[in-house]
Image (spheres, rainbow, N blue to C red):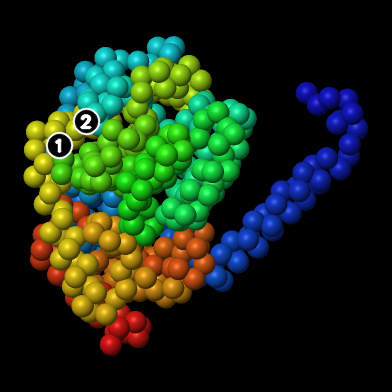
Amino acid sequence: MLVPWLARCPLRLVRAQSTVAHLRAVIEDELGKIKEAGTWKSERIITSKQGPHIKVEGRNTGILNFCANNYLGLSSHPEVIHAAHNALEEFGAGLSSVRFICGTQNIHKSLEEKIARFHHREDAILYISCFDANAGIFEALLTPEDAVLSDELNHASIIDGIRLCKANKYRYKHMDMVDLEAKLKDTQKHRLRLIATDGVFSMDGDIAPLQEICALAKCYNALVFIDECHATGFMGPNGRGTDELLGVMDQVAIVNSTLGKALGGAAGGYTTGPKPLIDLLRQRSRPYLFSNSLPPAVVGSASKALDLLMESNAIAQSMTAKTTRFRTKMTAAGFTISGNDHPISPVMLGDARLASQMADDMLERGIYVIGFSFPVVPKGKARIRVQISAAHSNEDIDRCVEAFTEVGRKHGVVS
């Protein structure tokens, strides 16, 4: 039933339609600009499980996949899949609730304990994604009395999480320790000072200088937070991450990471660190308090992935040689590869349209890669981000390099 004043409005339907039409016109104009700039992002449809070899809709032959975050090849590992099946059968499809109401099962607590043990921390808390973990920590921990110092190229989820908090915000130049120190000096008046950085920066594959960051943190009485989404499971001698790789596990206070990449590839994220912090997040972190619990099948698969890693570091270590093989061969072919010694191997091209066209040409040659352009990366720094997996064979890598060389010559990128 319409309220009286609305019933007296004879133009209400016309106005509603015209308003929607105006909205449509505004959006279509914006979409047109995206297409004109060459930054339109199409989604290819995969018709198989994730892995180094996949099937793509509209393609009759198998495709080599070089753009997934499936670093250890565990997304389709038989033991990981079996563990997910068992958890689904025993614990159901989902909890239909948030954790503190009726959404905590013993497998959630077991996984949290395993994550804390894996990272050598006191406790851990699960989230539905690491984006949520990053959205939930800064607001719960920091107040207007505090300061957060963030690398300018941190992941969007860190940036958004910091925006939500009321702390004083400082942004330092990418991996610039001189600038970070200057800002640490400026923030001495604040109660807490938290340095926030990606362990590995996902667009360039460069590794944060954690030894220098931790040294500055100690000098200026600050805390260190790292996002390890592109490091957990394979960086460091035992796959613990960049803090293990660089020998500062005891100096990094807080680690956020994901279960959706190397650790099974399904979904989920977490925070691990001091137990009082984890207790505080269970009381105040909004994404934790107001989101459904992680589905049991995801918990089961991630738990098995961690078991495999803690039993042996063979899978994690197998990727080092493959990463070196790809980077060396691509550099020899004349390509510019960003980053250093990381399976994220961005082929730098600069032009957004060129990156998109080359990615399409690579698919024609049976290689699945994606062009990255603004706003995912800065304007003028478009690239094709190649990602090496432990599941790739040397033959897979060589075939990818050969295809890149052919396509690069076609577009005048290499001679």
Q: How many marks?
A: 2
Look at 19% across and 60% down and name the residue there.
323
Are circles 1 and 2 on residues that touch, CB within 8 Å? yes
- Tell me where residue 360 appears, x and y as whole percent: 35, 70
Against 368, residue 256 (above or below) is above
Q: Residue at x 15, y 53 (%)?
A: 319
Q: Among all residues in the image, which is located at the extreme top?
A: 101
Residue 134 in the figure: left or right of residue 90? right
Residue 51: horizontal and vertical position, in percent? 20, 51
Q: Is residue 79 visible?
A: no
Tell me the kind of residue under disc 2: Phe
Judge by depth and name the residue closer to the eye, 381 or 13: 381
Q: Position of residue 345 (x, y in %)?
A: 29, 62
Pick the residue in front: 260 or 116. Answer: 116
User: Disc 1 marks which amino acid?
Assistant: Leu
Most extreme residue toward the front is: 219
Q: Which residue is mark 2?
A: 118
**Quadrant in the picture for the C terminus:** bottom left
- How far apart are the alpha carbons under marks 1 and 2? 9 Å
Between marks 1 and 2 in the image, the one whose residue lies nearer the viewer: 2
Disc 1 is placed on an element classified as helix
Label 2 SS:
helix
Q: Quadrant of the N terminus?
A: top right
Which residue appears at 33% of the width and 66% of the height? Answer: 338
Of the pair 384 and 53, the residue shown nearer to us: 384
- Identify the residue position indicated by label 1 in the image: 309
Measuring from the top left, give residue 374's x and y in whole percent.
Answer: 50, 62
Residue 240 visible in the picture: yes
In the image: residue 13, left or right of residue 350: right
